[in-house]
Amino acid sequence: MKTITETDSDFICDIQAQCFQNLQPEEVELVRASKTQVLFRKGDNLTKQGAFASYVLFILNGLAKQYIEGDAGRNFNLRIIRPGEFLGLSAVFNENTFNYSTIALTDCQAYLIEKEAIVKLVRNNGVFGYSIIKRYCEMNTVLFSTIGNLLYRQMNGRMAEILLYIDSLKTEKEEIFHLLSRKDLADFAGISMESAVKLLKNFEKDGLIQLNEKEIKILKYKTLAELSKKG
């Protein structure tokens, strides 16, 4: 992690996110005084599960992987973090530690904003508070969907869902599949890597996808979508 100062060429001076556009001038200054701009290199941890959280992260650019660390080195991937998203909101309103880990899939720039500043903005600015609550609820919806996927779908349905999800992120990064290993895909689906590899080969054999090393090209979106719902 590298702190970026105003003299660095990578410095981003304006907070472009819509939720920050609704702040009053004095509130903008509060954010400016409470933030540090940093660069996370690919492979760096943005958050660490169980670590003390004194700040919230706002992602300016880059992609990261959010996951829960389990026992015996087993992890479960929750989602891909994209620009414009917050990390650590639960530490503001609930706990003082991060309840998940996040690792950079590409170089990522972020603001580290002191959580006391976020609390003050939520209390004093209803529009900003509404946007934060909306984002928090959207994250909960993703979590509930993930839980449902694990509980009610078989392995082939889970893998189909994950492939469609990751493919939808190509607008952010065309080579998104190149950033993820087969173990990453397995951890998204909640299955072993061996099972993930076998499912991918079966999908290719059935003409649903095309495999080329790390690249995965979906050939039959409709069939894969049906499988994700019924599998």
Image (spheres, rainbow, N blue to C red):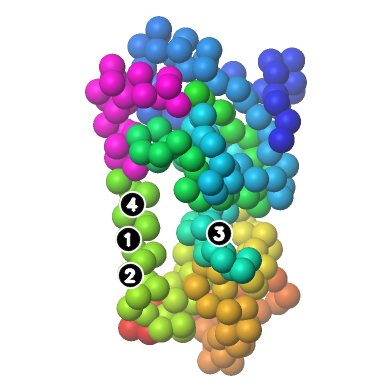
Q: Nearer the viewer, residue 60 or 72?
A: 72
Residue 68: % across, % down: 51, 58
- The reply to whether dot 2 and dot 1 touch (C-beta < 8 Å) is yes
Q: Quick one: label 3, few (<14), some, or many (20+) residues within 10 Å? A: some
Is the C-beta separation of discs 4 and 1 under 8 Å? yes
Q: Secondary structure at mark 1?
A: helix
Q: Quadrant of the N terminus?
A: top right
**Image marks 1 and 3: residues in contact by CB distance under 8 Å:** no
Task: Identify the residue shown where x is 58% and y is 79%.
Answer: 192
Please state which amino acid type lies under the numbered disc 1. Answer: Phe
Q: Secondary structure at mark 2?
A: helix
Q: Is residue 126 above or below residue 42?
A: above
Residue labelled with disc 1:
144
Distance between the alpha carbons at the discs numbered 2 and 1: 6 Å
Residue labelled with disc 3: 69
> Magenta segment, which residues?
115-136
Query: Which residue lies under the disc numbered 4?
Result: 140
State the CA–CA distance, disc 2 to disc 4: 12 Å
Q: CA distance from mark 4 to mark 3?
A: 18 Å
Residue type of the residue flagged with mark 4: Asn
